[in-house]
Image: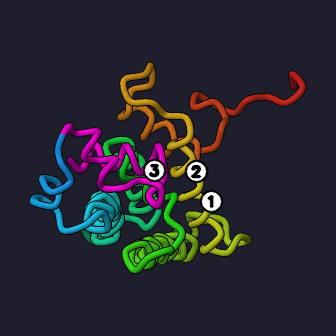
Amino acid sequence: MLRRAIDLFNTKGYDATSIGDLAKELGLTKSAIYHHVASKEALLSAALDEALDGLTTAVRTATSAAPGTSALQRLRTATEESVQILLDHLPAVTLLLRVRGNSAVELEALTRRRLIGDELATLVRAAVDEGSLRADIPPEVISRLLFGTVNSLVEWYRPGGPVDPTLLARWVTGVVFDGLGRPDGPATVGGT
């Protein structure tokens, strides 16, 4: 039921989707739906929790890495794990990225999302402080750029397509932290 609700919310929009729409999609009556969930908002809450719980775990696991793990490595891990969570829970994360704060459930989701961003910015700041990242860009901006890059995947990644999700997580992390230069050595500019 939750999977179908998420699909409908993403397709029609949360506000435009009714419990009647979900019942029709599932071949059930509205009362059968209400036997399993209290409300449409409860479905939205469960969907957003799915996305937020995974992302929170990814960032918190990275922040609490073993002593001696560099801030840069923790940040790389958080980024790679966030990509993997996004790919594993693509419909729920897509829905999360579309909420605008139109209800208490959406406001709570936005607050949780900001907290994840704050934790990521703390990791960025630690990587800057240890000299692993450039210091001329504010950590909050770097954090937003990281999340923006990861979040952009919802626009083009398709499960079952030609791009393996585990490889994609590594590729995104590699490009973000290592750039687009050749991994086997520096590329020459202008043939020199």
Helix, strand or loop under label 1: helix
**Label 3: which residue?**
94
Q: Give the amino acid at mark 2.
A: Thr
Q: Give the amino acid at mark 3.
A: Thr
13 part of magenta stretch: yes
**Label 1: which residue?**
145
The reply to whether dot 1 and dot 2 touch (C-beta < 8 Å) is yes
Q: Position of residue 37 (x, y in %)?
A: 16, 62
**Label 2: which residue?**
149
Q: Position of residue 160 (x, y in %)?
A: 36, 23
| Alpha carbon distance from label 3 to label 2 | 14 Å
The reply to whether dot 3 and dot 2 touch (C-beta < 8 Å) is no
Left-right relation of 92 to 24 = right
Q: Give the amino acid at mark 1.
A: Leu
- Circle 1 Cα neighbour tier, 10 Å, few/some/many (<14 / 14–19 / ≥20): few
**Which comes sooner in the sequence, label 3 or label 1?**
3
Question: Magenta region's main secondary structure?
Answer: helix
Q: Quadrant of residue 64?
A: bottom left
Span highlighted in magenta in the image:
1-27
Which of these two is toward me, 60 or 39? 39
Q: Is residue 144 above or below residue 114?
A: above
| Residue at 43% over, 39% down | 170
